[in-house]
Amino acid sequence: MLQPPHSSLQVAAVPAQRVPVRDRDQDAPWHTEAVCRRDEAGLFFAPSKEPTAARLSREEAAKRVCARCPVMVECREHALLQPEPYGVWGGLTAAERRVVLARRRRREMELKKTARTQGRIAAAG
Ligand code: SF4
């Protein structure tokens, strides 16, 4: 049976009713190459009431694991598309993923605005 990435990391920051997607769709191809399958528990998800310095150190350690992972891009996109609210995925923390998503939304809005403007110009011309 396949073990999902971070399989031993069902820890406090992930509410019991919200099972991480990486544990649900473990048959997805990218999971089979996930480096984090072999990493120690607690690296990718925060324990409850984790001090800031410990969190930053843990997240940097998780990112170092992600940096050598062959499926980092797939994992990151998965976490952005879900979106996954907790943990380090694809080398990004939850806060960093929120920034990426905000940038994407802003870019999409700008593209739509440009398309509308070009449509009006074409209709007038
Ligand atoms: S990129 Fe990081 S979180 Fe994603 S599968 Fe690889 S090691 Fe795990």
Image: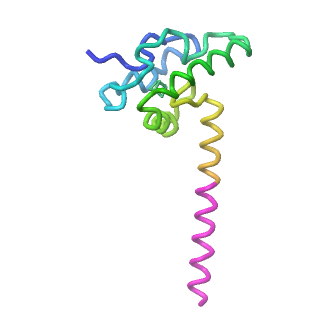
Q: Quadrant of the N terminus?
A: top left
Which is the main secondary structure of the residues drawn in magenta? helix
In the foreground, 60 or 103? 60
Q: Quadrant of residue 97?
A: top right
Name, please, the residue furthest toward the left. 1
Q: Position of residue 77 (x, y in %)?
A: 48, 39
Q: Residue at 29% of width from left, 18% of height from top? A: 2
Left or right of 64 on screen, residue 54:
right
Q: Position of residue 100 (x, y in %)?
A: 61, 42
Which residues, given as a range, are shown in magenta?
107-125
Percent x, y of residue 25: 35, 27
Residue 8 sits above or below residue 30 on the image: above
Q: Which residue does the image show at 51% across and 31% down from the upper left? A: 90
Q: Quadrant of residue 50?
A: top right
Residue 38, magenta (yes or no):
no
Residue 49 falls left or right of residue 28:
right
Residue occupying the point 46% across, 23% down: 20
Name the colouring of the figure: rainbow
Residue at (52% x, 28% y) in the render: 67
> Is residue 96 found left or right of 53 in the rendered image?
left
Q: Quadrant of residue 117?
A: bottom right
